[in-house]
């Protein structure tokens, strides 16, 4: 699953500090090569920022990164 900045996602399965059913907008994403980290910044309904950092060196993190569709689904609305 390719997640795109500005799109709205529903949490399908609890992960990190994200709760099932929560609606989030992906505000920013990127990759820091020096640290080997995939960074995701989400904004929730309360306009609070929530972060997810997945590291290349972690098998568990890479399993999540390669199967983001198990944890998030795109929803058609952009208003939260």
Image (cartoon, rainbow, N blue to C red):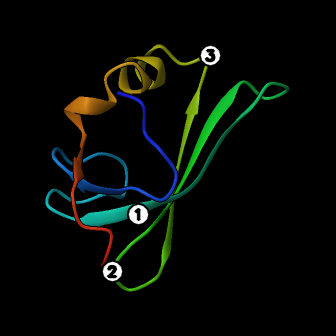
Q: Looking at the image, is mark 2 or mark 3 nearer the viewer?
A: 2
Q: Is residue 37 left or right of residue 32?
A: left
Looking at the image, tell me whether mark 3 or mark 1 is earlier in sequence order.
Answer: 1
Q: Which mark is residue 25?
A: 1
Q: Residue at x 43, y 25 (%)?
A: 65
Label 3 crowd bin: few (<14), some (14–19), many (20+), radius 10 Å: few
- Say which quarter of the image contains residue 64: top left
Give me the residue at 67% from left, 40% from top.
30
Q: Return the disc, 2 or 1, that comes first in the chain's sequence.
A: 1
Q: Closer to the camera, 2 or 24?
A: 2
Check the image and name the residue furthest to the bottom. Answer: 46
How crowded pointer 1 is (Cα within 10 Å; few <14, some 14-19, many 20+) is rated as many
Rendered location of residue 10, percent (x, y): 22, 55
Q: Where is residue 39, by image quadrant?
A: top right
Query: Where is mark 2, residue-wise?
Result: 45
In the rendering, at what x and y percent does residue 36 appear?
A: 72, 24
Report, in whole angstroms, how far the alpha carbon at label 3 lies from the one at label 1.
27 Å
- Dot 3 falls on a residue whose secondary structure is loop
Image disc number at residue 36: none
Tell me which numbered mark, 2 or 3, is placed earlier along the sequence. 2
Evaluate if marks 2 and 3 touch, with contact meaning CB atoms under 8 Å apart. no
**Camera-nearest residue between 34 and 78:** 78
Point out residue 33 in the picture as x, y percentages from the top left corner: 80, 25
Q: Indicate whether 26 appears above or below 64.
A: below
- Residue 57 bears which disc, if any? 3
Quarter of the rendering occupied by the N terminus: top left
Q: Is residue 73 above or below residue 37?
A: below
Q: Is residue 72 left or right of residue 58?
A: left
Q: Nearer the viewer, mark 3 or mark 1?
A: 1
- Say whether residue 75 is left or right of residue 42: left
Judged from the image, the secondary structure of the residue bearing numbered disc 1 is strand
């Amino acid at each position: 699953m390719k997640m795109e900045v500005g799109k709205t996602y529903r949490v399908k399965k609890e992960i990190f500090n994200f709760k099932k059913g929560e609606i989030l907008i992906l505000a920013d994403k990127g990759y820091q090569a020096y640290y080997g980290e995939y960074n995701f910044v989400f904004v929730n309904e309360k306009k609070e920022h929530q972060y997810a950092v997945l590291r290349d060196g972690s098998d568990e993190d890479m399993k999540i990164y390669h199967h983001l569709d198990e944890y998030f689904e795109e929803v058609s609305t952009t208003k939260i």
